[in-house]
Image (spheres, rainbow, N blue to C red):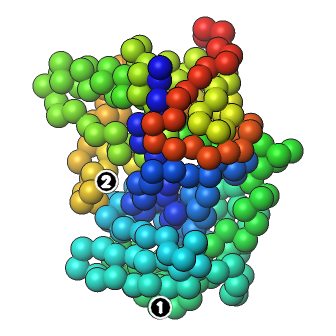
Amino acid sequence: MPTVSALTLYPIKGCAGVVVERAEATPTGLTHDRLFAPVKPDGTVLWQGEAPLLAAVRVRVLHGGAKLALSAPGAGELVLDAEADGPVLPVDVEKWPGSGIDLGDDVAEWLSGAVGKEVRLVREPDRAGRARAGVDPTALLVLSPASLDGLNARIAERGATPVPMDRFRPNIVISGWPEPHTEDRVARMAVGGAGIGFGELAIRCAVTLVDQTTGARVGPEPLRTLADYRREPDGVSFGLKAAVLTPGVIALGDDVTVTEWRRPR
């Protein structure tokens, strides 16, 4: 029986993930996942392709989300209020309504120093707005160790170093599927107490070239090898972006039951 072998949420876009044992899957994704974003002076998102040191910024969610604790090598730790209250800035963040709640000068100064770029931290003002008609087709990212093993075997064949799962920043890792890319073929599945449905294949970018522990760019793998066998019209794919069709709690060790398969491409 396939089971959930890892659960990770990413409170701040581009920053380190938080590994958890259980999480609430809502129509907009795991609770606290990508609720905050680092934005440049022009309001656009600062991402790891421009500032790979974002990956080394660790995040802890405190007091049910009322506070965040941030830490990074050489920068110490900063604890800040994360409530949805503060001045509103115009921002251009995927899925957001064109604005973000600014979390203040202290965290802006700290985060800018930690990643080496001028940046402010903002909070999403309307989380529920992500789910158009009640569904966000890209609420979760799902991967399997079988897919990673298949990729790493190809990388090793060309004499390069295999990559870890965290390069792909999945929310849910499902073990027990013997064939690589089984997640691609899922139309609907029950994962613990939640129902999940196919959204789209995950198109991968230069974030996968960044060591997610140190924040160092270390490519060209895995994109070089993915280009050999996972080409799509808009890039290379690896993993499933999925919608939460039935909200519920997902925990490590939960069974995964596929209730409907997609037709082969």
For the residue carrying disc 2, how many other residues have a C-alpha within 10 Å: few (<14), some (14-19), or many (20+)? many
82 sits left or right of 115 in the view: right
Residue at image location 46% in from the left, 46% down from the top: 7
Q: How many marks?
A: 2
Residue 256: give x, y in percent of width and height.
55, 27
Residue furthest out toward the right: 133
Mark seen at residue 212: 2
Quarter-of-image position of residue 124: bottom right
Q: Earlier in the sequence, mark 1 or mark 2?
A: 1
Spatial CA distance of label 1 from label 2 is 25 Å
> What residue sits right under mark 1 in the picture?
106
Any part of residue 89 in sight: no
Residue at image location 51% in from the left, 50% down from the top: 22
241 sits left or right of 106 in the view: right
Quarter-of-image position of residue 88: bottom right
Residue 261: give x, y in percent of width and height.
64, 14
For the residue carrying disc 1, how many other residues have a C-alpha within 10 Å: few (<14), some (14-19), or many (20+)? few
Residue furthest out toward the top: 264
Mark seen at residue 240: none
Name the kind of residue labelled 1 in the image: Asp
Secondary structure beneath disc 2? loop
Residue at image location 36% in from the left, 68% down from the top: 57
Quadrant holding the C terminus:
top right
Residue 216: give x, y in percent of width and height.
25, 57
Residue furthest out toward the left: 159
Q: Please tell me whether residue 206 is drawn above or below residue 245 in the rendered image.
A: below
Between 232 and 86, the one nearer to me in the picture: 86
Name the kind of residue labelled 2 in the image: Gln
Secondary structure beneath disc 1? helix
59 sits left or right of 250 in the view: left
